[in-house]
Structures are given as structure tokens and as C-alpha cells.
Amino acid sequence: MSKKDCQILQSDYEYDPIRKLIVATDGAENFNTVTDAINFAPNNSYDRVIIRVKEGVYENVEIPSYKTNIVLLGDGTDFTFISSSRSLGDGSTTFRSATFAVAGDGFVARDITIDDIAGPEKH
């Protein structure tokens, strides 16, 4: 891991406010959903794309292979959640039922809880 990547994982990391993508459930920032921010990020990026995910509960997230070097920075594991209950019981395939799926190289996340709440009754 590069020195820059190690810095990103530190809790006191300061990122360039001009180059940030911010997600907030209340609509007060650039994006309302994590998916919208990922879709906006450049394809096949050689540079880190930092997405700040503010406190709240967010939907399923899929990061395709052409969205590389994505970094998600949450407000803390007790405050920022990606949660879902997709399941075979709802008609999703096993592959599409993931709460959080990453195919893009170079992915990094910090201070986010990923919570699959489907439970055994939904298979």
C-alpha cells in the first residue's frame, strides 16, 4: 500500500475540498445516494476518487470493474450505514442480492458499516 493510501486510512486524513464528492441523505450535498456519486466518478481512474459519505442509511452499492480507485469515507461505523435486505425471497438472484459488491480495482473504505438485514427467513 502506498504512503498516500495509508494516509487516507488514517482518521485525521484531510482531503482536497475542491475535488470531493459528498453524499448526504438529506439532499444538502452533491449527491443523495452513494450510487449516484460512484456513477459520477470517472471511469478507469488512475487517481483516487474520494467520496465522503455522511451520516445516514444508504442503499445497496455496486462498484463495477471500470470504476477504479474509489475511496468511501464515512462519518463512523455508528453513523454511516449501507444496508439492504435484497434476497432470493424477493426475486433477486444470488449475485444481485449483495448489499455491497465491488469489482473495481483499488477500492478502499473507512468508517462505514455494511449491514445485510435480509435474514435467514428470506433465504
Image: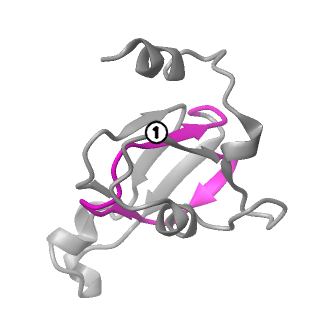
Question: Residue extending furthest bottom?
Answer: 91
Q: Position of residue 98 (x, y in %)?
A: 28, 63
Above-or-below relation of 106 to 117: above
Tally of marks: 1
Identify the residue at image location x=52%, y=23%: 8
Q: Amino acid at mark 1?
A: Arg
**Front residue of this view, candidates 11 and 78:** 11
Secondary element under disc 1, as helix, strand or loop, is: loop
Q: Where's the C terminus, which quadrant? A: bottom left
Above-or-below relation of 49 to 89: above
Above-or-below relation of 79 to 118: above
Quarter of the image for residue 29 reads bottom right
- Neighbour class for label 1 at 10 Å: few (<14), some, many (≥20)? some
Identify the residue at image location x=63%, y=19%: 13
Question: Residue extending furthest front?
Answer: 46
Question: Residue extending furthest left?
Answer: 94
Quarter of the image for residue 65 reads bottom left
Q: Position of residue 119 (x, y in %)?
A: 31, 60
From the viewer's perspective, tell me whether residue 93 is left or right of residue 23: left
Q: Within the magenta stretch, is there residue 62?
A: yes
**Front residue of this view, candidates 87 and 121:** 87
Question: Residue extending furthest right?
Answer: 28
Q: Position of residue 34 (x, y in %)?
A: 55, 61
From the viewer's perspective, tell me whether residue 74 is left or right of residue 28: left
From the viewer's perspective, tell me whether residue 65 is left or right of residue 41: left
Identify the residue at image location x=23%, y=61%: 120
Q: Where's the N terminus, which quadrant? A: top left
**Any part of residue 61 in sight:** yes
Per the rendered image, the range of residues in magenta is: 53-77
* Residue that label 1 marks: 48
Identify the residue at image location x=47%, y=58%: 83
